[in-house]
Image (spheres, rainbow, N blue to C red):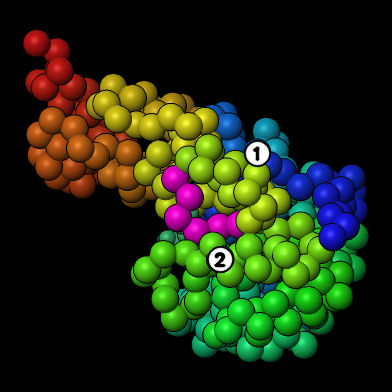
Amino acid sequence: MALRLIMPNSFRLPKNFLAPISEYTNSPFRLLCQKHGCNSVIVPLVNATAIARRADAVSELFIDKREKNVGVQLFGSAPSDFKIAAKKITENFPKIKFLDINCGCPMENIIAVGAGASLLNNPKRVCEIISAAKSSGYPVSVKMRLLPTIDKTVDFCKMIEKAGADFIIVHGRKPEQFYSGSADWGAIKKIHEEISLPLVGNGDIKTRAEGESRVSEGFCDSFMIGREAMRNPLCFENRNLQSFDEQKKIFFEYLRIAEKTTCIGITDARQKALFFFRGCKNCASLRAAISQAKTMAQLVSTINKYFYENYNS
Ligand SMILES: Cc1cc2nc3c(=O)[nH]c(=O)nc-3n(C[C@H](O)[C@H](O)[C@H](O)COP(=O)(O)O)c2cc1C
């Protein structure tokens, strides 16, 4: 097995990744995770067709210059759109490190346009998409789920390896499972044994230590964390948000980063607060008040008031 850990543009496979989570892993959140041990981030679910066909679509993307080892994930089904989108994105954001092709999203609206997990049934199309994206000169990864059998999954991976993909990210569930059951790490290991592409393992990892064990035990070459990072961006440094104080600190750190980067709205701030504030004293009343905050000022004063009422005696 000859691992190609160094790719075009001298990109070296990062040790860990924050998973792309649409409508959650925005630029300030990605920066927050990177301040706390995350090595690589992916801009989630960018519509290749919209980028290719609408002049202003690329300007809707926001990547902060301090984000490191950034990938942009494209979804779509037409290779010609991927070719144009890859060119536009890499010209507008030359510092990104790779392009990722979404072959795992099980959502109905994505499947309906022949994109995401429906591409698992169309390996020939995926190979065409890979070469279209590779025409940008940037490394290309494929983020996928498992096919119905391990043999079919390995065959799919071998085809994309042959087509020139630079690395592969495997979430160890089938599309129809959505997020139920456990990720099949046995399948991830089998793929790793059968192909020479660098493999990023993904599914149910809760801490950096757990991900590093998967790597040292030969399941994968790097790992990716998604849902745990949504609740606890400190998971990349093996810490967690146990106390209200830690939750408050990380929430205000997020707001400070957001203030200096892109403008986030109250909906985003409430969403992050509801993910971070869990299990604290009288938490139900805090969460109800967070949900009702209509402005950023109201949200901040809700949290400060809660702190004085519950922890300042
Ligand atoms: C709300 C939500 C949104 C997601 N959005 C995307 C996405 O845009 N692109 C993608 O490739 N995967 C997406 N995923 C899947 C994650 O990237 C990841 O593969 C999955 O959550 C498994 O990892 P985990 O067990 O560490 O969460 C999403 C997952 C969730 C829960």
Part of the protein shown in magenta:
201-206
Q: Residue furthest front?
A: 217
Residue 63 at x, y percent in the picture: 65, 45
Q: Is residue 83 above or below residue 250?
A: below
- Looking at the picture, tell me which residue is in the foreground, 95 or 199: 199
Using a 10 Å C-alpha cutoff, classify the residue at mark 2 as few (fewer than 14 neighbours), some (14 to 19) or many (20 or more).
few
Q: In the image, 232: left or right of 62?
A: left
Q: Earlier in the sequence, mark 2 or mark 1?
A: 1
Say which amino acid is labelled 1. Asn
Q: Secondary structure at mark 2?
A: helix
Which residue matches tag 2? 186
Q: In the image, 70: left or right of 187?
A: right
Q: Residue at x 42, y 72 (%)?
A: 178
Q: Secondary structure at mark 1?
A: loop
Residue 81 at x, y percent in the picture: 75, 77
Distance Cα–Cα, label 2 vs label 1? 25 Å
Residue 116 at x, y percent in the picture: 58, 77
Which residue matches tag 1? 39
